[in-house]
Each structure stands twice: as C-alpha cells, then as structure tokens.
Image (tube, rainbow, N blue to C red):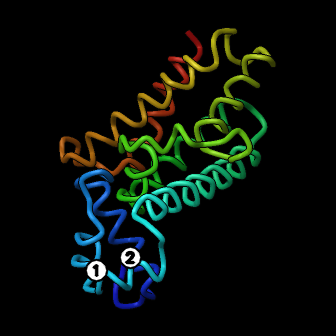
C-alpha cells in the first residue's frame, strides 16, 4: 500500500495491522504504532480511544467486509462445487492481494474471533452455510458441517500460513484449483 496517499487514520490502521501480525496485538504498544507510522502518540488517541479499540475495529470491520464479499461470490453460482471453487479462489486472491490483512483476519491468534456475534457476516460462517446447504441438498455427503468447514479452512489456511512464512513460493491464486480439488475430495469422502 502506498503510505503517502493514506490519511492519518488509514496510516495508523495499516501500521497497526502490520505490527499486530508481526508481533501480536498484546505485544504491540501504542508507542510502537506511533513510531512506525511516524506520528505522535497523542495523534493515535485522536482517532482511537485505545489499542484494543483499534485492534477490534480493524478485525470486525474487515472480517465483515470479507464475509459479505465471500457471500456475494458464492451467490453467483448454483452448485455447491461451483460455490466452493469460487470461494476458495476468493480466499486465495485475498491472500495474494493483501497477505497482512488476510493474516490478521484468519491466521493471527489474537482472540477477536471469540467476540464475533451471530449477526456479523463472516467468511467462516459463509463457508459453513454453503457446506451445510450442500449436505442438505445431497450434493455433499451428510456429516458435521462444522468439522467439514474446519477441514476445508485447514487446507486453505495451512497453505496460506506456509506462503506467509516463505515455505511456499507460488501465489495462492496459482494454487486455487489444487486447493479446490483437495477440498472437494475432503467433502465428498
């Protein structure tokens, strides 16, 4: 992202997210964010009451936006297989376009997922609902949709984590079809 084109609030948000992914939310201090953003600590408090408020706003706003987009993507298709392929493609593209945001939302262990309320649209629920609908319609063998969702996400997220750590060099988008095929094998038993 081009930091010179960001307003102060965007700069704080982006810098904080990068530090949260690199160091963790707990280990990142307001002072660290301000210093990395090149602003005074007081400026931080003009935009966010606390580091925890900043961390939650970044998580909840972006998670819901990702969930809404994923829901839109799956609705463009009629079969569970096509929906799954499109969603996995979307996950992969999202990682390649902004691995920091993807990591903050889906790979980082910061405890925010425990605060997600049932009324918040989120990517995990969209994927689960699609899998459950496929099971209900007979396109996917009956089973526990929570376990099936965890298994599909596990495939995607482990590859994303390996890519983020440098263990895999290919883009996730180039692996989208492979991940889709593997996910479908997991779901079809």
Q: Position of residue 118 (x, y in %)?
A: 71, 38
**81 over 163 or under it: above or below:** above
- Badge 1 element: helix
Q: How many marks?
A: 2
Q: Are marks 1 and 2 in contact (CB under 8 Å)?
A: yes
- Which residue is label 2 attached to? 12
- Badge 2 element: helix
- Badge 1: residue crowd in 10 Å (few <14, some 14–19, many ≥20): some
Which residue is rendered at x = 26% and y = 63% of the image?
29
Specify the quadrant that holds the C terminus: top right
- Give the quarter of the image for residue 22: bottom left
- Pick the residue in front: 21 or 145: 21
Which residue is rendered at x = 35% and y = 58% of the image?
100
- Give the quarter of the image for residue 17: bottom left
**31 over 78 or under it: above or below:** below
Of the numbered discs in the image, which one, if any, rests on residue 37?
Answer: 1
């Amino acid at each position: 992202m081009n930091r010179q084109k960001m307003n102060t609030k965007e700069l704080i948000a982006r810098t904080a997210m990068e530090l949260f992914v690199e160091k963790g939310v707990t280990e990142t201090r307001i002072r660290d964010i301000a210093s990395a953003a090149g602003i005074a600590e007081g400026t931080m408090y003009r935009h966010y009451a606390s580091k925890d408020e900043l961390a939650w706003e970044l998580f909840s706003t972006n998670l819901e936006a990702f969930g809404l987009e994923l829901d839109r993507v799956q609705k463009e298709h009629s079969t569970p297989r096509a929906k799954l392929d499109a969603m996995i493609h979307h996950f992969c593209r999202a990682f390649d376009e902004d691995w920091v945001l993807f990591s903050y939302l889906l790979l980082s262990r910061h405890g925010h997922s425990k605060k997600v309320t049932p009324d918040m649209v989120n990517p995990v629920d969209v994927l689960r609902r699609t899998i459950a609908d496929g099971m209900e319609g007979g396109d996917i063998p009956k089973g526990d949709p929570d376990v099936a969702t965890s298994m599909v996400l596990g495939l995607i997220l482990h590859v994303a984590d390996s890519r983020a750590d440098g263990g895999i060099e290919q883009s996730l988008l180039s692996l989208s079809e492979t991940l889709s095929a593997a996910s479908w094998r997991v779901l079809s038993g």
